[in-house]
Amino acid sequence: MIAPSVALDDGVVIHHPDLVNLYGCRIGAGSRIGTFVEIQKNASVGRDCKISSHTFICEGVTIEDGVFVGHGVMFTNDLYPRAVNPDGSLQTEKDWKLIPTLVRRHASIGSNVTILAGVTIGERAQVGAGAMVTKDVPDDAIVAGVPAKVIGYAKGVSLAPISSRRT
């Protein structure tokens, strides 16, 4: 379902619009959204991104331009999630604090990665499949593991600004 509250820029491709859940979010020009993706309110995906199937992008996540997100990636926005308050009442949005997450331009996130709330994944960084990102990832870093650790740096990667490729 694509809610009327979704802002879709020109050239966005949603492969199976009836098999996604998008509401209150923004998707940048030229981005592609796979099947069984959920993108919540107040989340944004930049231009020319690829969001692969079965991915969950929650409220408070900002994905900049040219980012690849693999299959089954899970973002979080709360470090201490609970269903109920100490008195047993069900929690509402008023009972927790949203912690924003940022994925910088041209980053690449492998399949089945979990990204904890509050981290920044740097420009051109690469996150290996199955990693759990618990702290910030520097620009150009290659991280892998649980928890994700820097295992190297991309060398010689030069990417033209996205805006210079579009007319």
Image (tube, helix red, strand yellow):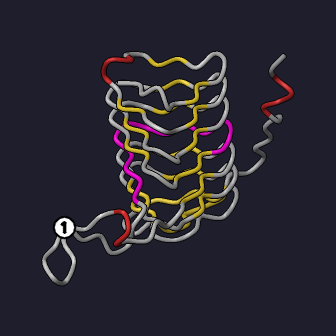
Residue at the bottom extreme of this rendering = 86
Quadrant holding the N terminus: top left
Q: Residue at x 53, y 17 (%)?
A: 13
Residue bearing mark 1: 90
Q: Nearer the viewer, residue 147 or 32?
A: 32
Which residue type carries mark 1?
Leu
Where residue 157 sits in the image (x, y, percent)? Answer: 75, 44
- Circle 1 Cα neighbour tier, 10 Å, few/some/many (<14 / 14–19 / ≥20): few
Where residue 72 sits in the image (x, y, percent)? Answer: 34, 41
Q: Residue at x 37, y 44 (%)?
A: 56
Q: Residue at x 68, y 52 (%)?
A: 154
Q: Is residue 49 left or right of residue 133?
A: right
Q: Main secondary structure of the magenta part?
A: loop
Q: Indicate yes or no whether the magenta region holds residue 74.
A: yes
Q: Is residue 111 left or right of residue 106?
A: left
Q: Residue at x 54, y 63 (%)?
A: 151
Q: Which residues are magenta?
A: 64-76
Q: Is residue 36 left or right of residue 136?
A: left
Where residue 143 sits in the image (x, y, percent)? Answer: 52, 60
Q: Nearer the viewer, residue 94 or 148?
A: 94
Q: Indicate yes or no whether the magenta region holds residue 2.
A: no
**Which of the 4 image quadrants contains residue 140?**
bottom right
Q: Nearer the viewer, residue 40 or 135?
A: 40
140 w.r.t. 160: above or below: below
115 w.r.t. 147: above or below: above
* Disc 1 secondary structure class: loop
Where residue 139 sits in the image (x, y, percent)? Answer: 70, 59
Quadrant holding the C terminus: top right
